[in-house]
Amino acid sequence: MQTTDSAPGASPQPTAGREKLPGIRHIVAVGSGKGGVGKSTVSVNLALALQQRGLRVGLVDADILGPSIPGMLGIATGEPPEMTPDSRMIPAQRFGLKVVSMGMLTGDDQPAVLRGPMVGKYLKMFVAGVQWGELDCLILDLPPGTGDTQLTLAQSMPLSGVVIVTTPQAVSLKIARRGLRMFEKVQVPILGIVENMRTFTCPHCGETTDIFRHGGGEQMSEELGVPFLGALPLDAEVVTCGDEGRPIVVDLPKSTSARVYSAIADALLAKLHEAAAGIEPFVWKWESNQGAPAWNEGAVQPHGARNIPVGLLRRDPRTLSLLWQDGHRDDLDVRDLRLACRCALCIEEMSGRKLLDPQTVRADVSPRQITSIGHYAIQFDWSDGHNSGIYAFNDLRAMGERAALQSVEDV
């Protein structure tokens, strides 16, 4: 059953003061579809530009297998960090920036040879297992691609959004587009695109050359309807400063590149202020209603997204209500939700054939606990012991539409 009626709930809360993790207001990932586009350089200089605006900033080198941040900041490698009495890492500091990287643990010449689960373990430790203190923004410099690291972050970290870095040439733009689409699928807000290495200016004659073409990132942002944060020149000083551990924002603050980074930081801050939407992370005990997420009618927008929930409610012991950002409401029967599980135990992955026999599911099955998964899904721990299904918000909205259609047909 569906209705557009509103349900009572908590009044809307201001987004500016919400913390993504204890003490951390915003977590921003910087990603790219491919390597070699200057993503780590952008991460370092963007973090420092934000700090110059009075923000308290931390930086995580999330490229666990190929760390490069220590070298760009002139931080010693191979020296284990100090630990707090409760076994939390104390980050290194450089130019007032708090930093954690796998390179600090392994050194320059020692590779980190790790399987996927261990990469995810280190990544979570570098974010949640560090004594960051109070931060306005934590920047995560991601490895290139759309693999384990990106999915781990989307599912386990309450990201404020992602910045996509690309260069203007067609091959880079195509791969960057794939990376952007991946984050869209898991409903991580796209804060904007940065185009790197746009134009080279000869230091001798002043002539400009578009070595990697021109304006591709800006055109992509227009085509995909995402913000364009700015375009950085191809600047030899950026490379020199990075190689010597003196980022250009600090070493040459009046240079053209440093001024562009400052403008990008300003644009990013504006987008962070706009991007707050949806519900905060939660662990919800169904029977007692402990930890229930807010029902935020004030977050409904005339042209809001159809797949971003702004409220979840236990309407009664058998009904989960969802309020979407576009103002639509779905009321879903909890047994129907259990039967709709699409995990590998309930649906054959390759063929889509149903493996779950509805007759084996009790009529009184109900959630024991509901947990948010990133920005894009929820997970149920059911009273029958099943807990491996992830319900994407897109699928829940589609399920509500099917239920409404079935109700009309039954009438």
Image (tube, rainbow, N blue to C red):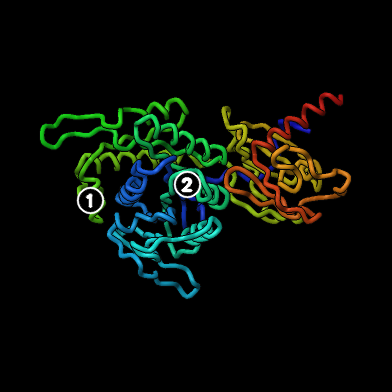
What is the number of callouts on the image? 2
Instruction: Give the residue type at disc 2.
Output: Ala
Q: Secondary structure at mark 2?
A: loop
2 vs 231, left or right, is right
For the question of whether residue 83 can be seen, the reply is: yes
Relative to 408, residue 70 above or below: below
Q: Which mark is residue 67?
A: none
Label 1 belongs to which residue? 241
Label 2 belongs to which residue? 16
Instruction: Give the residue type at disc 1.
Output: Cys
Q: Secondary structure at mark 1?
A: helix
Give the CA separation, mark 1 to mark 2. Answer: 34 Å
Please tell me which residue is depicted at 71% across the width and 50% down the height of the picture.
380
Label 1 close to label 2 by CB (< 8 Å): no
Please tell me which residue is depicted at 24% across the width and 45% down the height of the picture.
238
Residue 206 in the image: x percent, y percent? 14, 32
Residue 154 in the image: x percent, y percent? 54, 47
Relative to 224, residue 30 above or below: below
Front position in the image: 41 or 353:
353
Front position in the image: 50 or 104:
104
The nearer-to-camera label among 1 and 2 is: 1
257 vs 80, left or right, is left
Please tell me which residue is depicted at 78% across the width and 56% down the height of the picture.
385
